[in-house]
Every structure is written in C-alpha cells, then in structure tokens.
Image: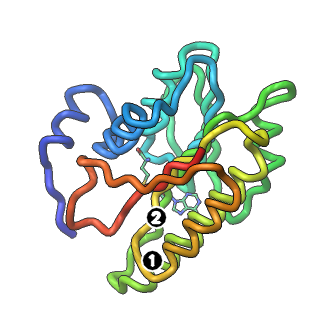
Amino acid sequence: MKKVQDHYFHKARKEGYRARSVYKLQEADRKFRIFKKGSCVLDLGAAPGAWSQYASKRLGKAGRVISVDINGMKGLGPNVTVLKGDIYELEPQFLQDCLGKGRHFDIVLSDMAPRTTGNRSVDHLRSIALAETALSFANSLLLPGRGCFYCKVFEGSDLLEFRQRCQEVFKSVKTFKPKSSRAESVEIFLFCK
Ligand SMILES: C[S@@+](CC[C@H](N)C(=O)[O-])C[C@H]1O[C@@H](n2cnc3c(N)ncnc32)[C@H](O)[C@@H]1O
C-alpha cells in the first residue's frame, strides 16, 4: 500500500492531529459552516480520532462528541465519549442514551471506510452499505428540520441512488471533494442539511 507523507500529513503532525483526514472535515466546515459551539456530534468510523479531535475543539466545553469505531481510541478530549463497536451491531437508541436525556444530535459525521479488497466494485458496494447505515442513523437521531450529515462514500455505480436517498431525507445535498482528498482517491463526500 502506498503511503504518501504529503503536505497534509506534515501539517496534521505539526497541529497535533492524529490523521491528515482532519483537513477533509476542516475544509467542509469552512465551506458549509458545520459546527456551532455547544452542538452534539455523532462521529461514525472515528479512529484514529482526528475528526473527533477537530469537532471537540470546535464545539467547546458545552458540546459533546460520541465517537464510534471498531477500533478503540483514547484521550480524545474531555467532551468526547468513545464507543468501541461495529456500526452494524448498534441501535440508534443506544447512541441517544449515551448522549443522555434532554440532548439531541445536531451533526452526524461518517468517514467510515471498508477494509479495501482491491476490487473497486466490491469496495464501492461496501462503502455504500456503510454510508446507508450512517444515513439511517442520521435519519433516526437528528431532529426533523434541523441538523446535518457529512458522509464519505466511494464513487461507483450506486452512488447516484444513495444520493437520491439522501435527498429524500434532507432538503439540500451537496457533493464535495476536498483538496486534501487525493485526486486519485475514489472517495467523495456528501454534505446534507
Ligand atoms: C478513514 S478511517 C476514519 C478516520 C477518522 N475520520 C479520523 O479522522 O481519524 C475509517 C474508519 O472506519 C471504521 N469502520 C469501518 N467499518 C466500520 C464499522 N462497521 N463500524 C464502525 N467503524 C467502522 C474503520 O475502523 C476506520 O477506523
């Protein structure tokens, strides 16, 4: 596997982030104004934790981040709760209960990616399955008429259909390819509001 230590890799190190992927969220935040102080965020596929680190800082002390991944993480910040688990085995109500009564999620993030096989079509369909699950969590957990969903998906045959399903749930759906996402990467992001 090619490991390129590019400009964003070094920038992430210098700024104390665990992965260069943080800039794929920061760019979207600058464009779509995702975060507000005090908001609650569900971060799906959060390991090693760069998006959660970023969200934690942007939300401030009153905000909360619930970070979910198959892999465990530690030390992400005082307002971050880490859950080690498989998204396919979790229920939205469990995540709501983790957040606690009287609070609701404002933002659902998904940077989930399947373990790639090298078969582009298989990887695409697995990525769509993860993104579909993230969408159903967003649909269950965000309050009607409020909130946003920022989700990674690998390009391929079923992307249009997935985008349409996002359009059934959200008023606005925008496709976004951050500069920090390598041009040769098949990943793209949807920002839904
Ligand atoms: C690209 S990484 C996320 C990077 C993260 N946004 C960051 O900034 O540190 C994708 C993550 O998706 C997670 N993932 C893949 N399938 C998952 C599943 N079924 N349930 C939970 N997490 C999953 C992987 O374990 C991996 O850590």
Q: Residue at x 32, y 82 (%)?
A: 118
Q: Secondary structure at mark 1?
A: helix
Residue 29 to residue 61: above or below = below
Q: Residue at x 64, y 55 (%)?
A: 85
Q: Quadrant of the N terminus?
A: bottom left
Q: Secondary structure at mark 2?
A: strand
The residue to which callout 2 is attached is: 153
- Of callouts 2 and 1, which one flags the residue occurring earlier in the amino acid sequence? 1
Number of marks in the image? Answer: 2
Position of 18 compared to 142: left or right? left
Disc 2 marks a residue whose amino acid type is Val
The residue to which callout 1 is attached is: 124
Residue 86 lies in what quarter of the image?
A: bottom right
List x then y, in percent, for residue 35.
Answer: 52, 28
Q: Nearer the viewer, residue 4 or 103?
A: 103
List x then y, in percent, for residue 76.
Answer: 49, 30
Count neighbours of disc 2 (C-alpha within 10 A) and say few if under 14, some if 14 to 19, many if 20 or more: many
Residue 78 to residue 122: above or below = above
Q: Answer whether residue 60 is visible to the viewer in this image.
A: yes
Disc 1 marks a residue whose amino acid type is His
Q: Residue at x 42, y 85 (%)?
A: 121
